[in-house]
Image (tube, rainbow, N blue to C red):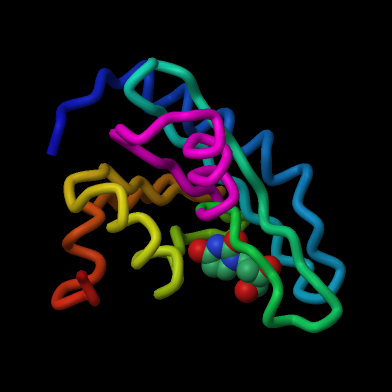
Amino acid sequence: MIPLPEDLLQRLAAAARLASAHAYAPYSRFRVGAACVAGSGRVYSGANVENASYGLTICAERNALFQAVAAGERDISAIVVYTPTPAPTTPCGACRQVLCEFGAAIRVVCCCDGDEVREFASGELLPDRFQL
Ligand code: THU
């Protein structure tokens, strides 16, 4: 995994936490935020956006990543996910597959309201994933 400066990780964590305030989560009330950094050095953030038909909900991780990709970025080095929980939670299966689309060495950092932080490489989160 590409080493990332601690201050950048702190910046991403702050952006992810801020983004969670914009979550649209009237059904689960679970407000998630994510922020990723791309090759340009720019930070992109996103929150989960739910839908009455539940299955159309998009997670914070995919929203942040798609913001980056839609801005022309391809080289994503890290994503931080924030959940308002006492312990970190890890990305869902769909987000794992989508993260791996942009590389197996993306640093995935999961933070929460507690002190524990969990870190993974994207590829480690989804072994034997579908690939074309
Ligand atoms: N959610 C995320 O945004 N990211 C995750 O890693 C897991 C779940 C969202 C989807 C849904 O809006 C809510 O959290 C409850 O599942």
- The relative height of residue 47 versus residue 76 in the rendered view (above or below) is below
Which residue occupies the foreground of this view, 85 or 101? 101
- The relative height of residue 130 versus residue 125 in the rendered view (above or below) is below
Which residue occupies the foreground of this view, 2 or 88? 2
Q: Position of residue 112 (x, y in %)?
A: 51, 50
Q: For residue 1, what is the image quadrant? A: top left
Q: Is residue 16 left or right of residue 81?
A: right
Residue stretch rendered in magenta on the structure = 62-82
Q: For residue 97, what is the image quadrant? A: bottom left
Q: Position of residue 66 (x, y in %)?
A: 53, 46
Query: Where is ligand 1, by quadrant?
Result: bottom right
* Residue 130 is a magenta residue: no
Which quadrant holds the C terminus?
A: bottom left
Q: Is residue 92 left or right of residue 57?
A: left
* Residue 71 is a magenta residue: yes
Which residue occupies the foreground of this view, 6 or 37? 37
Residue at x 69% of width, y 70% of height: 57
State the residue lying farthest toward the front: 132
